[in-house]
Amino acid sequence: MLLRFGAPFTTVTSSTAVTTRSSPAITFHFLSTDSVRNNNNFCFHQVVSYSSRLNCKATKEAAESMAASTASPSASKQALISLSDKKDLDLLATGLQELGYTIVSTGGTASALEKAGISVTKVEELTKFPEMLDGRVKTLHPSVHGGILAKRDQSHHMEALEKHSTFELVVVNLYPFYEKVTSTDGVLFDDGIENIDIGGPTMIRAAAKNHKDVLVVVDSQDYPLLLEFLKGNKDDQHFRRKLAWKAFQHVAAYDSAVSEWLWKQTEGDKFPPSFTVPLSLKSSLRYGENPHQKAAFYTDSSLSEVNGGGIATAIQHHGKEMSYNNYLDADAAWNCVCEFENPTCVVVKHTNPCGVASRDDLIEAYRLAVKADPVSAFGGIVAFNKEVDEALARDIREFRSPTDGETRMFYEIVVAPSYSEKGLEILRGKSKTLRILEAKKNSRGKLSLRQVGGGWLAQDADDLTPEEIKFDVVSEKSPEESELNDAKFAWLCVKHVKSNAIVIAKNNCMLGMGSGQPNRVDSLRIALRKAGDEVKGAALASDAFFPFGN
């Protein structure tokens, strides 16, 4: 799936169609069996032998026999294989040879096949033209692309290939451009350019376009399905179209990576005139935000997201499958807790942090975060920015609600950067449904996208820290260091609360918050009510200014 931004069997359907089958020794040009059955006076045309072209007459029975033999699995068919990633190549090649396929291949793939003891015809034997320009030109030749693009039900196409062969199958994957340019060692510009595949995408697109006659495979996971399909000796256009879709999608994602990389090398601006976001399906969800909405979850395969962290790449160690709302809440909790350097716990309900606390002792931070709003915390998401060890895991499992001191706290999700072996074991024992996620911190400097009807909004991620901001004192009294620290803490919290947002904090602990109210005064009242008597001496943060004196 892409978000785009900016400006092996022959089926004869006509009695007059000419169909070509190729063999290392002899090629037959024949009329369809339907025309044979319906025309007692038919004759075979253009039977080609090793040395000369012969015209002969045949009986109806002999013709049917010959037509049947050419349609059998033992008839010679050609597969073109050119792979950078050679995973399961021997499995594929062995299966194809057992089905009577002649394998044509290039460079390293041909060498790998020969090493495995599999018979292979090198592509230069077919083209009569050696590869050139340091391998840049190998398969860009009419003998290759004619054999892929020829429409089998068009007689003039097949006549044009009279001295050439056709391919029933093309199996190709591409130079590892994505892996090269995202390598931790970095890549020189010229090396990046050399890893842009040209011949591979051309063959893939050609085969996908002509998928009615040519099967195309770009993923090694499809090899078993392909072999089963070929063994069935049947024609399934749905299967062919699905492979063709996957091929075009594969090339489109590849091109999007090249485009993204080249733009960054050329301009570096975050907002190019157009760009593509490649998305890969991670899971189908039970439903969306509401039960009547269908939903799915996709990961972003953009170069900018490689090793970028976040909930999308989190590992789930335990619990029920994630839901649409689970992802939203977990993302909100993780984004908030990652703001803090000191050991911190964040509790989120409906994407809003209802409790935040930082302490040297993570157990204490956890209890204070729950205490801020225990009613909202029940059934919420708990996030930590440090490892969950055995002691913390026991407290999460056994902690009772501050409202009555009896009810054991229940959570939908726990998310942390890591877990000790014993800590993970204890948390698994809390509930069969508790989702336990292990996530990496989001990298800074990402692009933030938000959909609106018919378009998208793009902006820099809001990842500024208090250390990067100059706090101006506009009152007569200057804040003490502890008060300024409280203000910074509240400021980090309020950026994750839905507007209109108010946060009241003291001693690195959120005492109360008000969110999502149409007017800021109501959000303030809610926050003050939740903070209670502890509000005296606390810092207050708002996500915008107060327009009036009240």
Image (tube, rainbow, N blue to C red):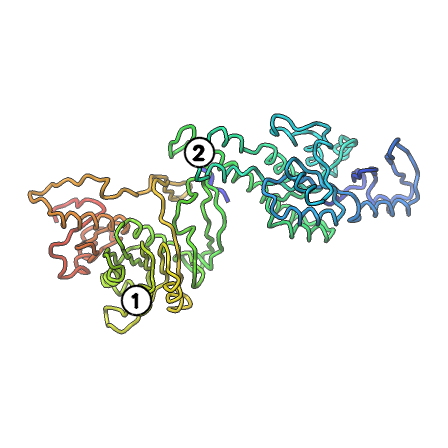
Q: CA distance from mark 2 to mark 1?
A: 50 Å
Residue 164: percent from left, percent from top? 76, 32
Say which of 56 and 179 sits in front.
Answer: 179
Identify the residue at the far left of this view: 476
Q: How many marks?
A: 2
Asked if 25 appears above or below 354 in the picture, the reply is above
- The image quadrant of residue 154 is top right
Q: Is residue 300 visible?
A: yes
Q: Nearer the viewer, mark 2 or mark 1?
A: 1
Residue positioned 62% across, 38% down in the render: 204
Q: Quadrant of residue 27?
A: top right
Residue 17 in view: no
Q: Which residue is mark 1?
A: 395
Q: Secondary structure at mark 2?
A: strand
Q: Does 448 sit above or below residue 414?
A: above
**What is the three-letter code of the residue carrying label 1?**
Asp
Viewer-nearest residue: 297 or 416: 416
Instruction: Name the residue nearer the viewer: 38 or 192.
Output: 192
Which residue is painted at 64% across and 26% down in the image? 132
* Crowding at mark 1 (Cα within 10 Å: few <14, some 14-19, many 20+): some
Q: Position of residue 307 (x, y in %)?
A: 42, 45
Q: Amino acid at mark 2?
A: Ser
Say which of 1 and 426 sits in front. Answer: 426
Q: Horizontal placement of 313 versus 366: left or right?
A: right
What element does badge 1 sit on? helix
Write the residue at 77% across / 49% down.
Answer: 73
Q: Residues within 10 Å of mark 2 (few under 14, many from 20)?
A: few
Residue under label 2: 274
